[in-house]
Each structure stands twice: as structure tokens, then as C-alpha cells.
Image (cartoon, rainbow, N blue to C red):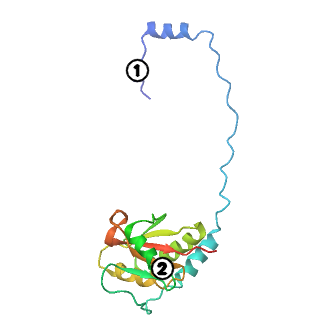
Amino acid sequence: MKKRFTLAEDDLQLFRQTVVGAKPLPQDRVKPSPPRRAKTALPPRRLIQEQVDASVYFSDEFQPLLQEEGPPRYVRPGVSPYEVKKLRRGDYTPELFLDLHGLTQAEAKQELGALMAACRREHVHCACVMHGHGKHILKQQTPLWLAQHPDVKGFHQAPKEFGGSAALLILVELAS
């Protein structure tokens, strides 16, 4: 290895005079404790099972009755339409975001199932699904799938700050 900087003999002598009487520091022998695992972490098997269970709700054959005109929106029967109006205005801030860009329909269904499971597990009331524009396949299918899930109280096209016409804000019913 090349020495880039060499000290002149005068500087080296000055350094030795300055550090005379200096004592070396004792070695720190304290071993750091291993990082703690989160107590709420679920076993991988259970997470996969939750995703599979949640994705069972999404069918391609069932076509829920959604409004054709205007932005995509849905309110489950028994839920106040005012809640969806609050989604449209941006009164609810999403806590979880799911980006479906580049996924196939099967992968998107599985990810939606995982999102719904995560919302229930983490007690998240509002989530955002970004489906993008693309060829409009996921843009058309995502509302149809979400309307089938029993935990979805409603959804509406997201305001501009959360993705506009390329995203949906979802209102999730939390377990009692």
C-alpha cells in the first residue's frame, strides 16, 4: 500500500513530543445485545394464510352493480353515503398504500387480499390502492374486486394528492 502523505521529520518529532504520557484507552468489551424481535410479528405461514383467505373474496365472474357515470365509487348497503363523500374530499388520510403497477391480475388479487388482511391486523381505517392508468385492466377490475370484499365499507377515486384517477381510497371496517 502506498503512503500518500508522509510527515516531515520535524512534524513527526513534534507529534511524538505532544503525545508523551498519553495512555491508551481501555478496550470496550461490552457486547451489544441482540436486536429484539417485534412481539406482534406473525409467523410467515400465518401471513400467507391471511393473504390467501382474504383473496378468496375476489371473483372475476361476479359483477357488482357500480355506478357507470362519474368516478369509480361504492358504498356498501347500510353505510352512510356521507363517508364516501369524505373520501372524495380527502378528509380521510390513507395509512397504507398499495401500488399495483406492473402486476398481473392474479398478483393484484393476492396483493389486495394482503392489503385487506394488513388493514384488519394493523387497525387501519383508510388505505390507498394505486392501480395506474395503463391498459385500464386493473383500473376496471380493482373496483369490482373491492366491492366484493366484506370488510370494504366503501371506496372512491382518490384526490389528486393521493393519485387522482389512477388510485382509489378505501374505507375499511375494523373488527370490533
Q: Callout 1: helix, strand or loop? A: loop
In the picture, the disc for residue 77 is none
Which amino acid type corresponds to the residue marked 1 in the rendered image? Phe
Nearer the camera: disc 1 or disc 2: 2
Q: Does residue 100 show up?
A: no
Would you place residue 60 above or below residue 34 in this image? below
* Residue located at (43% from left, 75% from top): 84
Image coordinates of residue 135 in percent, x first then y, are 29, 79
Q: Mark 1: few, some, or many residues within 10 Å (few <14, many ≥20)?
A: few
Mark 2 and mark 1 in contact (Cβ < 8 Å)?
no
So how many labels did they put on this image?
2
Q: Is residue 28 above or below residue 50?
A: above
User: To which quarter of the image does residue 142 belong?
Assistant: bottom left
Residue matched to label 1: 5
> What amino acid type should be assigned to the residue bearing mark 2?
Ser
- In the picture, the disc for residue 80 is 2
Question: Which percent across, then down, holds residue 11?
Answer: 45, 9
Q: Earlier in the sequence, mark 1 or mark 2?
A: 1
